[in-house]
Image (tube, grey):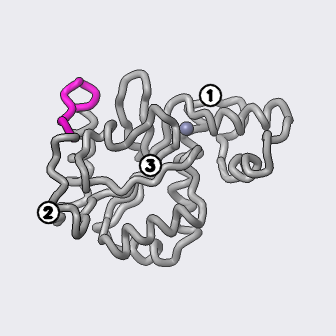
Amino acid sequence: MPERNLSIPEYLNLLKQGNQRWKTGNSTNWLSTPADDLVEAQTPYAVIIACADSRVVPEFIFDSVLGELFVIRIAGNIVTPEVVASIEFAVDALGIKLVIVLGHQNCGAVTGKLNSVRQETPAPTPNMSQMFDQIQLAPKDQDLFEHIKANTNHQATEIFKLSSLLVEANKDEHFAVLSAYYKLDEKEVIFFP
Ligand SMILES: [Zn+2]
C-alpha cells in the first residue's frame, strides 16, 4: 500500500496529470491494478464530492486506480449532513488532506433548479424540492456556467458550516478544500482559485 506523505500541491499535480492522461486518451488500465494489498486498509489521498451524473466519474476523469480517491457522489454535488459525515470520516480516520468539490458542465440538477426558479414552478417532488433548496445559483441573468460555478463554490464553503472537525482540520496549512469544474466537451478539469 502506498505511503501518502506528499504536499497539497503535489497531490493536486497527481490529479492534474491524471486528468491530462484522460483528456488525451492515455488512461491507465485501472482494471489491471492489483487490489490484494488494499484488502486490509486504504490510503486514498483525496476526497472528491461529485455529481451523480453518469458522465462525471472521478476515477476516470482523474485516471486514478483503486485506493486513490474517496469519492462521494450526489446530484448537484450538494453538501448535506450525510455527505459531511463521509468527508469527516475520510479526514479523521483516513487522514486525507485534500477535499475537492467537483461541479460540471451542463449539470442537470443546477439546470433543474434554474428552470424551477425561472418558470416559477415547484420541484417535481418534496425530496427534489429539498435538493433544489440546497443548490445555490448565481445572481440572475447569468449563464449556466456561472450558476454551476456559484453552486460548486457554495458547497465548498458549506462543508465548514456543518463541521467543526473540518474547521479545525482547515487550520492546518497542509489541508485544503477546493472547488473545480469538469468540462464534458474537453474532458478537462479546471480548478477555481
Ligand atoms: Zn450534475
Mark 2 and mark 3 lie on one chain; the one further toward the N terminus is 2
Q: Which residue is mark 3?
A: 179
What's the residue type where badge 1 is placed?
Answer: Asp
Q: Are marks 3 and 1 in contact (CB under 8 Å)?
A: no
Q: Which residue is mark 1?
A: 143
Query: At 85% from the left edge and 35% from the top edge, which residue is drawn?
Result: 121
In which quadrant of this rendering is ligand 1 seen?
top right
Mark 1 and mark 2 lie on one chain; the one further toward the N terminus is 2
Q: Is residue 153 magenta?
A: no
Q: Which residue is mark 2?
A: 1
Q: Is residue 54 above or below residue 5?
A: above
x and y, in percent, of residue 159 in the image: 53, 63
- For disc 2, the neighbor class at 10 Å (few under 14, some 14 to 19, many from 20) is few
Label 2 within 8 A of ligand 1 by Cβ = no
How far is the residue under mark 2 from the one under mark 3?
28 Å
What's the residue type where badge 2 is placed?
Answer: Met
x and y, in percent, of residue 25 in the image: 23, 24
Q: Is residue 102 above or below residue 165?
A: above
Snapshot quadrant of residue 61: top left
How far is the residue under mark 3 from the one under mark 1?
19 Å
Q: Which mark is residue 14?
A: none
Q: Is residue 19 above or below residue 163?
A: above
Query: At 65% from the left edge and 30% from the top edge, which residue is drawn?
Result: 142
Q: Are marks 2 and 3 in contact (CB under 8 Å)?
A: no
69 lies left or right of 31: right
Q: Secondary structure at mark 1?
A: loop
Query: At 21% from the left edge and 47% from the top edge, which residue is drawn?
Result: 14
x and y, in percent, of residue 65 in the image: 23, 47
